[in-house]
Amino acid sequence: MNVVYTHIRRADAAVVNALAHYGVATVHEAQGRRGLLGPTLRPIFPGARLAGPAVTVSLPPADNWMIHVAVEQCQAGDVLVVAPTSYSDAGYFGELLATSLAARGVRGLVIDAGVRDVGDLTRMGFPVWSKAVHAQGTVKETLGSVNVPVVCAGGLVDAGDVVIADDDGVCIVPRLQAAAVLQASEARELKEAGTRERLQQGELGLDIYDMREKLARRGLIFRRHPAAE
Amino acid sequence: MNVVYTHIRRADAAVVNALAHYGVATVHEAQGRRGLLGPTLRPIFPGARLAGPAVTVSLPPADNWMIHVAVEQCQAGDVLVVAPTSYSDAGYFGELLATSLAARGVRGLVIDAGVRDVGDLTRMGFPVWSKAVHAQGTVKETLGSVNVPVVCAGGLVDAGDVVIADDDGVCIVPRLQAAAVLQASEARELKEAGTRERLQQGELGLDIYDMREKLARRGLIFRRHPAAE
Amino acid sequence: MNVVYTHIRRADAAVVNALAHYGVATVHEAQGRRGLLGPTLRPIFPGARLAGPAVTVSLPPADNWMIHVAVEQCQAGDVLVVAPTSYSDAGYFGELLATSLAARGVRGLVIDAGVRDVGDLTRMGFPVWSKAVHAQGTVKETLGSVNVPVVCAGGLVDAGDVVIADDDGVCIVPRLQAAAVLQASEARELKEAGTRERLQQGELGLDIYDMREKLARRGLIFRRHPAAE
Amino acid sequence: MNVVYTHIRRADAAVVNALAHYGVATVHEAQGRRGLLGPTLRPIFPGARLAGPAVTVSLPPADNWMIHVAVEQCQAGDVLVVAPTSYSDAGYFGELLATSLAARGVRGLVIDAGVRDVGDLTRMGFPVWSKAVHAQGTVKETLGSVNVPVVCAGGLVDAGDVVIADDDGVCIVPRLQAAAVLQASEARELKEAGTRERLQQGELGLDIYDMREKLARRGLIFRRHPAAE
Amino acid sequence: MNVVYTHIRRADAAVVNALAHYGVATVHEAQGRRGLLGPTLRPIFPGARLAGPAVTVSLPPADNWMIHVAVEQCQAGDVLVVAPTSYSDAGYFGELLATSLAARGVRGLVIDAGVRDVGDLTRMGFPVWSKAVHAQGTVKETLGSVNVPVVCAGGLVDAGDVVIADDDGVCIVPRLQAAAVLQASEARELKEAGTRERLQQGELGLDIYDMREKLARRGLIFRRHPAAE
Amino acid sequence: MNVVYTHIRRADAAVVNALAHYGVATVHEAQGRRGLLGPTLRPIFPGARLAGPAVTVSLPPADNWMIHVAVEQCQAGDVLVVAPTSYSDAGYFGELLATSLAARGVRGLVIDAGVRDVGDLTRMGFPVWSKAVHAQGTVKETLGSVNVPVVCAGGLVDAGDVVIADDDGVCIVPRLQAAAVLQASEARELKEAGTRERLQQGELGLDIYDMREKLARRGLIFRRHPAAE
């Protein structure tokens, strides 16, 4: 059955926008090393970062019809997340679809497939995380679904979940955990600020994290290199 | 038999130069989704684009002798297209060969293998689309052929065909179809300009492309999300 | 047995710094096409280049404990070289470790695995050559070794060897051969300067390298293209 | 939080055993082309097939501790499904673990990673679908979870779901849909039996499936080949 | 334009059947190292070998409609060659299509994509060379073409060309060169028979092929190993 | 400099033959998880296993000249280990070379590249571990070296080292450690025999390895599944 779910619930906008201050690595750690999508997803230009609730699309290989359907379900601030049901690196998405999404205030695209017109998308500043850049066209023949749970680059994404993306890749925060993960991210950042300062002064992580005894207990040996003078 | 074909016929220069205004995605669509080389070919720096007639080179894995031979067959405006007869990601091409090609007015290189000196090539502004960046050297021991048809990244390229390349990859237009594809590209661009304007105003592709009825006929269902309030 | 070798001997600093003027491709050729690490290692931002003696780290998949141990063994000018004992693309290294290494004057990192915080690393100007960008965290549970010989991206690296890295990738010069390779690099660069000038004037490699006779002897045929007018 | 869920509910044994008569391709089609795990999972020997409820394991890269924990949660007839939280092709599983599972009546293993001792496993007739064969050992240092939902080779698997596996790969049937999918599989097989007989007689699919008119409407042209006599 | 070419000319049946005695490696060498398809194509079971004229199919990713169309164009002795226009590893082909082809006397399938029901295909003895085994279904929505030239696994195949396939992979002999390649294959096999006998007697290739002088001239040095007693 | 080292020292024959009783996984563990070559090396037919001292070959991509040279350096019981200096999956080795090696009593081949004639090799029972099966021919134009240390599939192999290979892949035991690794392998096997028996009786690894307390200390929680009745 192919269905478009409407009126999805989105993570709270204030929480989403606060999460945008933290990078993918921080958020991923803050929620217990969960939610990271695979490293095959790369940004089409460096420096982009975003946070926003997901509108999800499940569609057939090399058929982008459902993206056109999904545009209507997007609100300002959303991020479109697209996953084919079978491997495809075809170019599902280009400058016209980006124009349409940008006109609605959509913040960007995450797609486990290919995109095209990346020169135009870069000039527009419309960020995309994709598996490939590929001009290969798609058809509009077969239905899929919108706002169902999808597996994208090996991770699970549901409608309304928070998408965090930057140069490191993409991380998903489940809608109902967004507030807790925001708190954990703030706490982690605070703690790291202190560590950063000590490291800048030249202190060693070995001492800051108190690792020497545990290393010795596990049996690590220090020895002058045989080739040392 | 190893042969260098001389005096190849090239696509008309005016047509080639006009095609340069259209990107790979447009030209690929305009000629019926044919001619695209595989997405493994990536530009060594962003923003490059070119169009030019192909001088083709078929050569052994990890042996770049025939590139030296092919330089002599190149004219100003040409694009060199290089394909090994067996998989290789060795570095067939670097700054000295680029210097030689640039001195003859060659516009760039497409190679289904590796290149090196990419820092220098970037500073020179000599565009290359390759499968890999690799400093691994090659030898000059075994013959190949110049200006024979080659399969490059899964696509067929013949001498004199038009090579179109940009951030999306590389597309080949057969020499005898160049004028027709130019016309089709112009027509496609014109039509897209109108669509673009409507999308910018916020109109939906669903309406512009008149998709709603076809979607309903195929059985697409719209339903309030179970988690909606 | 897990061991940290201390007091390693490093290649002579003057030689290392002189080698830094030559790119990976030149050094790789100058030492007889040896020492190149595989093309899967890519810089996280373009334009970086460095030379420095290696501090090597052998560690388990997805466990970065030994990097913390290795920091203490690094001196100003060093380059950290990290190789897991089994395939991993996890994110072993991020901005805090880079801060610690930068505070000690370490010049960069080569890692046959993933890194994260690449936006921050780029802003810091801390160069990294890695197999992947991946936010996936690692643990600190299992020992490895520091300053033992490691196989990194298919090449052998020993403590104190010279690491050369630029946009083309990474090349290793064994410590005891560094002076000889420097001389060979200087000689090669000198010779290429002459060739470059002749190529810029439009002379052909076919003539400069005196290839025509050898090509004819091997049986290369020149023939007017059948489609020529 | 790392948790081992006990007392999971399994799909009905009679339904599971009846599903075992249908192959992966049939079941996958019968449930609307859902549930298929990725084609990177291959059987370690040809001809194996099984069906059984899943006991799921989420564990760290290159750490098989949680498999030892999961054995205790397995009953006769179960299938173990193992997914690392980050890419790993290490050898998590070998002959001793297989001996332990076989002693409990477990039917086989699906693992999005590597296995070893495949010669022994073949002699034992213990079927495994894995991403790699790799003797590389793992550690037992870091916790994971048992009987939580996991993403395995791009598909979602929950504890108690039915695992179907054969030479084509692996398909997952959600526990609550098992009875319905069994019915759909029986219906599909029945229909295919009739088609098979007609094809064996030499009838064409074009006629059996009544495709000729639709092809003509879409514009398919039949034309004598230019090279025909 | 989508077209089905009928009445193709096939390579002479006597020549095709004689070519079947020679393996892929021999034929590939005999025609000057041309015509080999890429090593990504693997047989679904060991020991199969065939020769036959190609019926070619160009079709969209994950859409097998045109295979049904192509069946009608096949005669006894033919080999079906299928190539998607964009990357796909979906399962285009299974036991029902094999039943239909077998009923017409078709000898096997070469497909640059996935197949399924490989257990059944093995039991039927219907040989297939494919890029993947994958149960993922396809649709029947978009046209392609039959008996046009296709690029399959990096090699060019035209209707009526001879397909040679065995455990080594797949090689294509152009229709008009089949007789000449047969002669060259016979000659090569004859010559190798003599060499084989000498090698079995313990003679060295170094002597049989008279390599010692050429090796010395190129500068090969023989030296007692430093670790020798 | 290209050199053939003669008169290499081999690991003791009695030790080598005793090591042949232990599989790759056992030997790899017994020597501290070192020496394993990468999982890209696969046997061309199942069930083969061998042990023997290595004769090593370093050669150019797609050039098998040095294999012909290396044959002369082989003795009965040896295993040939071949590594190209740059990536190649060409078919360096086929039935004639196997005939020559078999005539000298060589036990098998390990090659980080492609082989061909695998049907013939299987019939001959000549075992090969390779990265690819590929009929693509090679040339004989460029020198390499024999019995130098090589990096093969990511692992280091020196002349005279012991090669252990079976269905799990390939493991290298340094010549001087062979006797110690044999002892460790025997000890490991003995210990595993006891464990195996207890597992066959249904005892759990959790108890045999005494894991329960350590799991609890690390914080593992057992909890009734929410969906349990």
Image (cartoon, coloured by chain):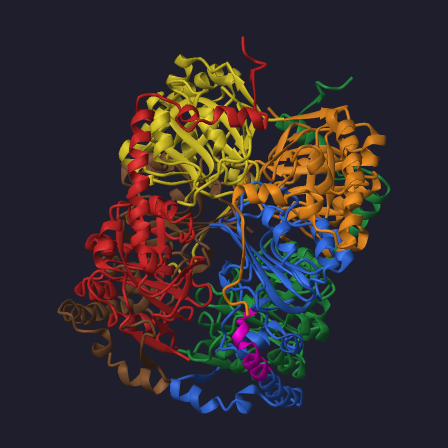
Chain colours: A brown, B yellow, C red, D green, E orange, F blue
Q: Is residue D79 left or right of residue D22?
A: left
Whole-percent x, y for residue A58 in the image: 48, 50
Give percent across and percent down for residue B152.
52, 33
Asked if one can make out residue C167 in the rendered structure from this viewpoint, the answer is: no
Q: Residue at x 74, y 24 (%)?
A: E176
Give the quarter of the image for residue D159.
bottom right
Residue F184 in percent (x, y) is at 56, 83
* Camera-nearest residue between E80 and F7: F7
- Quarter of the picture containing the C terminus of chain A is bottom left
Q: Residue at x 14, y 68 (%)?
A: A197
Task: Characterize the magenta stretch by its predominant secondary structure.
Answer: helix
**On screen, F119 above or below B178?**
below
To which quarter of the image does residue B169 belong? top left
Instruction: Note whether residue E118 is visible.
Output: yes
Going by the picture, which residue comes out furthest to the top? C229
Q: Is residue E48 left or right of residue D113?
A: right
Q: Picture coordinates of residue B209 (x, y %)? A: 44, 31
Q: Which residues are magenta?
A: F172-185
Image mark count: 0
Q: Is residue F106 above or below residue E39?
A: below
